[in-house]
Amino acid sequence: MKLLIDESFQQDLARILREAGHDAVHLIDLGRSGATDEDVLAQARADGRIVVTADTDFGTLLALTARPDPASCCSAGPARAQRTAHKRCSTFSPSSTNSSAAEPLSR
């Protein structure tokens, strides 16, 4: 599973996920600090990544584009979302392409 961590999370989340065996990169690591939501989605699509974010605007953007890729993982708040993202992502193998990874983290 390839993940793109949005700026709504600390860079540590990408590191923690990498240590758990996931292919995770933070926007800051890509030099994309301050990128618009549209640019973040474009980056994720170009790299084949799932956006992990606490920004609920991504769900709206995905609905407006009517494209199934990438999935956006959203939650109510960054601290809770960071703990939940690590917990949820650790249940998938790094090579998983399971579509259930696209479910909102707040469930």
Image (cartoon, rainbow, N blue to C red):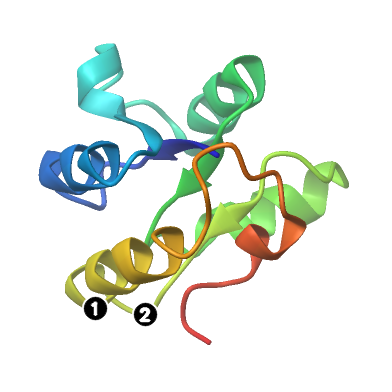
Q: Amino acid at mark 2?
A: Ala
For numbered disc 2, what is the local secondary structure?
A: loop
Pointer 2 residue = 76
Asked whether residue 34 is in view, the answer is no
Circle 1 Cα neighbour tier, 10 Å, few/some/many (<14 / 14–19 / ≥20): few
Q: Residue 27: image x %, image y %?
A: 30, 27
Which residue is at a point 34% across and 70% down the rendered structure image? Answer: 87
Q: Is residue 91 above or below residue 53?
A: below
Q: Residue 78: image x %, image y %?
A: 23, 67
Task: Tell which of 34 and 29 is nearer to you.
Answer: 29
Instruction: Tell me, yes or no, whether the two marked residues, 2 and 1, touch with CB atoms within 8 Å.
Output: yes
Which residue is at a point 66% across and 50% down the rendered structure image? Answer: 71
Q: Amino acid at mark 1?
A: Arg
Residue 41's quadrant in the figure?
top right
Residue 53's quadrant in the figure?
bottom left
Residue 95's quadrant in the figure?
top right
Q: Is residue 90 above or below residue 62?
A: below
Q: Is residue 57 above or below residue 67?
A: below
- Point out the residue furthest to the right here: 66
For numbered disc 1, what is the local secondary structure?
A: helix
Task: Tell which of 42 and 97 is nearer to you.
Answer: 97
Pointer 1 residue = 80
